[in-house]
Amino acid sequence: MVRPRNVGRVTEEKDIPNWEQEEFESRTDIKKAAQAVTDLGMQIADMTETEIHKLQLPQEFVDAVLMLKSMDKGPALKRQRMFVGKLLRQNEPLIIEIKAKLAEVEAKKKQQNAYFHQLEKWRDRLVDEGDTALSELLNLYPQIDRQQMRQWIRNAKKEQSQNKPPKSAREIFQYLKALEW
């Protein structure tokens, strides 16, 4: 019986090197770093047009990315993808700037997500606990309309018991979202 060569062989995943580093160990590392830069361009192309313009990148790069977004498929798409990667590799400070801006956008998304989770917890507490949670919320935010909030809480409990869609719970969430936190 012939034993396959790769049985029992363990390969470690190597980190993808940064394009901005001074030296590479091998040509494979150069190719992986170049592919990572091209993938960064594709990540920007996956964003909406307004998000791309908010990044305030050089116009030549923005035009290339927008052209890439407009393409469907075929060899022209691959050429444009490679062109976007080439533009990035030629301008290394732009790569650093893009990475910083994408990290900032990601941090804002995480912060907004945490904020929405906090609102959901308040909504759930209001529906479950009722007046005790409402009094805590009123201590924190006295501008809340107590009467309207109590009505929504009663309606949400009733909808929950009758297995209806949570219309009032959504209204509580929207009201809390509209408050200035």
Image (cartoon, rainbow, N blue to C red):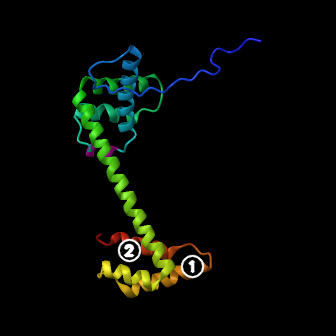
Q: Please tell me whether mark 1 sits on a helix, a strand or a loop.
A: helix
Look at label 2 and name its amino acid: Tyr
Name the one closer to the observer, 86 or 131: 131
Residue 162: % across, % down:
62, 79
Name the one closer to the observer, 79 or 1: 1
**Count of number-bearing discs:** 2
Label 2, residues with CA under 10 Å away: few <14, some 14-19, many ≥20: some
Mark 1 vs 2, N-terminal side: 1
Instruction: State the residue position of label 1.
Output: 159
> Residue, x 38% and y 14% (percent of image)?
27
> Residue, x 57% and y 79% (percent of image)?
159
Label 1, residues with CA under 10 Å away: few <14, some 14-19, many ≥20: some
Instruction: State the residue position of label 2.
Output: 175
Name the one closer to the observer, 94 or 47: 94
Q: Please tell me whether mark 2 sits on a helix, a strand or a loop.
A: helix
- Do residues under tags 1 and 2 come within 8 Å of each other at their CB atoms? no
Name the one closer to the observer, 9 or 105: 9
Look at the picture and state if 158 lies above or below 120. below
Residue 20: % across, % down:
27, 26
> Residue, x 36% and y 52% (percent of image)?
109
| Magenta segment | 49-54
Residue 101: % across, % down:
27, 42
Residue 55 visible in the current orientation: yes
Residue farthest toward the right in the current orientation of the protein: 1
Q: Main secondary structure of the magenta part?
A: helix
